[in-house]
Amino acid sequence: MNSTRRDFLKAGLAASTALLPLPALAQGGGPRAVVVGGGFAGATCARALRHADPRIAVTLVEANPTFTACPFSNAVIVGLRELSAQQFTYERVAADGVTVTRGMATAVDPQARTVTLADGARLTYDRLVLAPGIDIRWGALAGYDQAAAAQMPHAWQAGDQTLLLRRQLEAMDDGGLVVISAPANPFRCPPGPYERASLIAHYLKTKKPKSKLIVLDAKDAFSKQKLFQAAWAELYPGLLEWVPLSKGGAVTSVEPATRTFVTDFGRHQANVANVIPPQKAGVIAAAAGVADRTGWCPIDPVTFESKLQPRIHVIGDAAIAGAMPKSAFAANSQAKTCAAAVAQLLTGGTPATPKLINTCYSLVAPDYGISVAGVYQPTNGQLADVPGAGGVSPSEAPRATRAAEAVLAEAWFRTITTEVFG
Ligand SMILES: Cc1cc2nc3c(=O)[nH]c(=O)nc-3n(C[C@H](O)[C@H](O)[C@H](O)COP(=O)(O)OP(=O)(O)OC[C@H]3O[C@@H](n4cnc5c(N)ncnc54)[C@H](O)[C@@H]3O)c2cc1C
């Protein structure tokens, strides 16, 4: 690790420790916080709220009994890992004193400060934290609706879709064509499509070497691009072709019956078609009135309170977090900041100005990892990069360094999932 990265990691740790002062004592009965969504953001936030002040009554509303994590789900798609390694329950979250309520939140009344669940139950709150992740913008790409996802899986919410894409790859004959379409910004996990392309290329190279992979991209630039492209040239020459926007990569429609991608420049009929479609904040955000016309949620960068509705905070992928990418690491970092702020606001204190960190590892092959890291602080009402902090893996590095980063990637996943769910 170079000194810049060591320094910013130290700075980040110091900042996150400084973010967790004990809030002033609440008078009388404990204030009520409701958190919707038990993913990387919501589960972290619910636990951090209890740790910040155990008198805060915290309810976590989550639609599913088991959480299925997206990081490392690309490895599941190519058979390097089982889906069960991605799955976590809420027992430890509940053991921290969080009331875990299974159900789908369907409505929020910001005036009455209530959340309504699909079964009609109603929860009242003093502060609400929405952490619903993403939903697919069905129909935003012509031809791509819920039925189309059964033919052309997105696998951008881990679970059945992940397994469907895996089965399709396994069933494909050697010599087949795999096509991935990547969306315009912003979307969940900026390096994710390129990690997926890399691991699928690895699968094809080792299992079906006569096959080909094309990535049709709605962008001309992407996260860790130089590192990915150098690795592709070394590991997958002639196998993986990336078509950027300026070379006709933007997909204008899809035809699910024939697994066809249509661009202004031509048509690509795939044997396996992975559409990574346009996205938006989880639908409860729009229902609560905290999503703007972009479909995402503008927030105050100190407290993560919505700029559109008071006393409702939005964290994780659903939020517009400035320079911070939509990642599990970022969601976890935002959740701790938000919990500290909400604990202060519920007990008459003043939230501290935060510094947040993010690191995203990607696997280009099972033993070849690369990473990008950043530090962020509120600047002019947005979360902006701290100049000089962060960076990417060195462009010239021996394979031992890449192998070490692949090991670090796994260690990161174990650490974060233990912190959030363990
Ligand atoms: C292929 C892929 C690879 C990735 N790799 C990485 C990686 O290596 N590193 C990294 O940092 N990030 C990675 N990510 C990104 C990461 O998965 C997301 O950024 C992260 O999950 C965001 O956390 P979140 O809490 O906002 O949303 P989620 O983790 O999706 O959690 C949202 C939760 O809210 C629940 N929910 C939604 N709406 C409701 C409702 N109305 N009522 C009740 N519950 C609700 C959902 O069931 C879900 O459990 C990857 C993503 C993908 C797709």
Image (tube, helix red, strand yellow):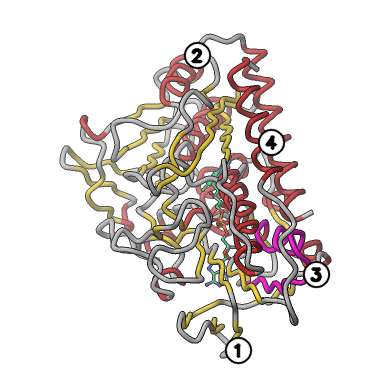
Please name which of the two marks, 4 or 1, marks the residue nearer to the observer.
Answer: 4
- Mark 4 Cα within 10 Å, few/some/many (few <14, many 20+)? few
Location of residue 422 with respect to 393 vertically, above or below: below
Cα–Cα gap, marks 4 and 1: 41 Å
For label 2, the residue is 395
Ligand 1 falls in which quarter? Answer: bottom right
Residue beneath disc 4? 14
Element type at marker 1? loop
Q: How many numbered callouts?
A: 4
The x and y percentages for residue 334 are 57, 50
Quarter residue 8 falls in: top right
Disc 2 residue: CB within 8 Å of ligand 1: no
Residue shown at 66%/76% (left/top)?
32
Closer to the camera: disc 4 or disc 3? 4
Q: Provide the secondary structure element on which disc 3 rests.
A: loop
Sequence-first tag of 3 and 2: 3
The residue shown at (33%, 63%) is 292
Q: Residues within 10 Å of mark 1 (few under 14, many from 20)?
A: few
Q: Quadrant of residue 229?
A: top left
Residues at marks 4 and 3, CA–CA distance in whole angstroms: 27 Å
Rendered view: 363 above or below 94:
above
Please tell me how crowded label 2 is: few (under 14), some (14-19), or many (20+) other residues with Cα within 10 Å.
few
Q: Going 29% across and 48% down the picture, which residue do you hit?
A: 260
What amino acid type should be assigned to the residue bearing mark 1? Ala
Q: Secondary structure at mark 4?
A: helix
Which mark is on residue 121? 1
What is the magenta range? Answer: 44-61
- Asked whether 243 or 326 is in front, the reply is 326
